[in-house]
Image (cartoon, rainbow, N blue to C red):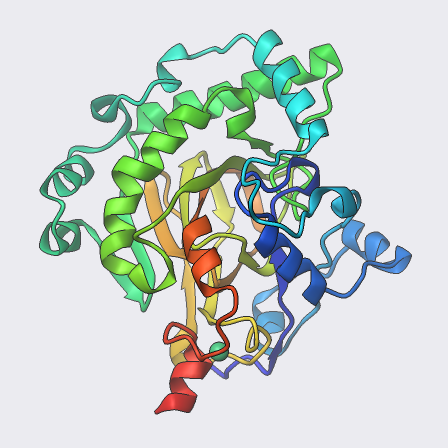
Amino acid sequence: MSAIKKIKIEYEEDNPNASSSSNPGRGLMVSSMMHPPKQEDTKEDIKPHIPKHEDTKEDIKPHIPKQEDTKDDIKPHIENLSCESEREQEYKQRVMSNYQPMHRELYEMNPPTFFVPSFLSAIHDNTREGFKRIITEPSPGILTFQMLKPEFCKMLMDEFKNFEKWAGETGTRIMHPTTMYKYGAILDHFGLEKMLGRLMEDFILPMSTVFFPEVGGAMLDSHHGFIVEYGAGADVYLDFHVDDSEVTLNVCLGEQFSGGELFFRGVRCVKHVNVESELDEIFDYSQVPGRAVLHRGRHRHCAVSTTSGHRVNMLLWCKSSVFREMTKDEQNSPSWCGICRREQN
Ligand SMILES: [Zn+2]
């Protein structure tokens, strides 16, 4: 297999309409790096290049996320960390006061009904050895482990379907998770914010403290939780990008599908985001319902086409405003970037 000759990466950001409860500063930095979207780009956005296996090795055309409304939403100052846009606040309030949850038990963290015993036991031990018992690391920085019970996966998918149904019936336009999605929904918007906060603090933070301390994994303090949907009548694939997160949790919930692999292509700093992959950075992951993938936000990835069936994933972008503030002026080469590390050796 040959290395990628050229990867063009775009930054995936929170939906600008639903922007940046956690970090306006990063949003600014990221968007100032992007080419300003033109009319053609927006059209391409509707019919973008479909990444296939051969393509990923040679030439990936960038997906240009839509940037409508970003001017209002991206705030250059960091002091106001809870600056949800007015539009997002209104939307969230309308949903929260009108939407009737289907499975109320999802809205309060209840570890024994959410998680498989092996995961609970590792979190309880809270040691590197304990985590290593459940984690597989098929490629450096890609941690996978069994996490969610099938019953929980089903309940969350049902809740999402119920939410979509409610939105359809009430004429509510669903705010999508990021600029790169046309389907899916932000879980924080319909009451799951508190539960997902506990998920990050009590279950992800202990692991990211051990495995990703150099990217702020020990100081996560906010999240963006969402559900994405692939297949007929939903998104088909997701172009190469890096997440606007320090650490990303990605768990497939179901259902029956083929395709939809996650392609990982190395971790990159801002300066090196488009530099080609090394052979040992190329890793393709086949998704399994209930099984989690935990990786650095700066680990470049895409989801290839879900060729049949229907696939739903839950994502939790875990962020650290403290880490971003600490590192915003840093010019030195971060140890976690594959190219910086190579240059240092
Ligand atoms: Zn670098």
178 versus 107 height, above or below: below
Instruction: Residue 314: tell me if it is visible.
Output: no
Residue extending furthest toward the right:
39
Number of marks drawn: 0
Task: Specify whether 62 is left or right of 57.
Answer: right
Residue extending furthest toward the front:
79
Task: Specify whether 196 is left or right of 138.
Answer: right
Residue situated in front as seen by the camera: 191 or 306: 191
Residue situated in front as seen by the camera: 332 or 309: 332
* Occupied quadrant, residue 72: top right
Q: Residue 252's x, y, as percent?
A: 42, 41
Residue situated in front as seen by the camera: 89 or 250: 89
Which residue is painted at 32% across and 69% down in the image? 140
Q: Residue 153's x, y, as percent?
A: 38, 28
Which residue is painted at 38% across and 82% down in the image? 341
Q: Which image quarter is the C terminus in?
A: bottom left
35 versus 124 height, above or below: below
Instruction: Residue 47: tell me if it is visible.
Output: yes
131 versus 264 height, above or below: above
Task: Specify whether 119 is left or right of 204.
Answer: left
Q: Residue 274's x, y, as percent?
A: 60, 75
Residue situated in front as seen by the camera: 308 or 236: 236
* Occupied quadrant, residue 284: bottom left
Q: Residue 238's x, y, as percent?
A: 60, 53
Which residue is painted at 22% across and 53% down in the image? 135
Which residue is painted at 48% across and 63% down in the image? 298
